[in-house]
Amino acid sequence: MKQTANVTVTDYATGMKIFRSPDFGVDHPFRATRQIFGPSVLDTEAATHVERKRSWMAQFLPARIASPEVQGMIARAVDEGFAHAAEQDDLLAAAVYIPNRVLLLLLGLEDIDPIEHHTKLRAITDFLETNARNPEVMAARTYLQEGPFAATHALFDGLDDERQRNELLLFSYAAGETTFVAMKCMLLLWAQDPAQFAARIAEEGVKSFLATNMRNDPPLGIATRYCKQDTEIDGLTFAKGDLVHVDIVTANKTCPMSATGVPMDFTFGAGKHSCPGHLLAKAELEAVIERLSALDGARYRIEGDLDAPRPLNFRDPGDVRITSALELA
């Protein structure tokens, strides 16, 4: 019997063809998410995928993100997040607080502490990296499924009860974790050279700068597909059962630009699986950039190893801090 091969693809064009080809199906970590959240929008091959995707897109339209309601939630989360960072003497603590506070406010669960919420779900991140189950993973799953996260809510209200429940559970985790990693990476970039950070924003504009930064340092590192039948793409032969890992970090380096100068990268996915909440994540990151412009970068220093290996899926820079001997502004 032929051994299943693990193949890594680093070329952007080949990766895009794999994402869009019917010969490849979703695999780890997306397949593993079914064990935590149940069938969800991540199941791109499901008959309900289009319906679920449309429901997500409807929640996070540009007008909705720009509304006073959502912008107020983001502003509140940023204020509280930077205050929390001051208490912890670690600017990176804001990256944990802000996205989790935003998602909890959107769910109407402001009484839940965002740091405790994040901590209780960390085992899921480890599970999606290793696919190894342990008691902590089951505790996180129970916390989500037996908590208030799947209660009837305005989000995804166009779906039936079961589908709405699963999307709410997914949102309760994913809306915090991916943005947390992206925000942590951005804060570290700022702390390495605040003057250059500010100069680039002045030259490129916030939105272009953010797109470039996330292309160069994406929060997710790989996207894995399994080959459903023998096929060939760009001279590469794939056999049925092969696991194909698209290296997002490397592929992004050669991504083309759109007619409007926007990079067509894999940071927020491609093909059927593209992140439907990317506008919310970008809005949070833009709000943090605005807050950073008021800080004196000379007051901060990075502690820890920036070159330490990162996980393959959620590319958390790991055990580093941004500290100051002075109180945060």
Image: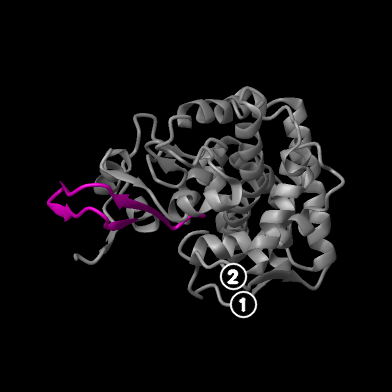
Task: Tell me the SS state at disc 2.
Answer: loop
Taking the image as drawn, is residue 327 in sight?
no
Q: Residue furthest right?
A: 111
Which region shows up in magenta?
Answer: 218-245
Task: Tell me the SS state at disc 1.
Answer: loop
| Image-based side of 217 in relation to 66, left or right | left
Indicate the quadrant containing the C terminus: top left, top right, bottom left or bottom right.
bottom right
Task: Pick the residue in front: 250 or 42.
Answer: 42
| Type of amino acid at the residue the image marks with label 2 | Gly
Task: Pick the residue in front: 6 or 258.
Answer: 6
Q: Are marks 2 and 1 in contact (CB under 8 Å)?
A: yes
Task: Pick the residue in front: 21 or 195.
Answer: 21
Mark 1 neighbour density, 10 Å: few (under 14) some (14–19) many (20 or more)? few
What separation in Å lies between label 2 and label 1 (alpha carbons)? 9 Å
Q: Which residue is mark 2?
A: 318
Precedes in sequence: disc 2 or disc 1: 1
Q: Nearer the viewer, mark 2 or mark 1?
A: 2
Is residue 134 inside the magenta stretch? no
| Image-based side of 229 in relation to 303, left or right | left
Q: Residue furthest front?
A: 1
Taking the image as drawn, is residue 264 in sight?
yes
Question: For the point 39% across and 57% down, which residue is it?
Answer: 249
Indicate the quadrant containing the N terminus: top left, top right, bottom left or bottom right.
bottom left
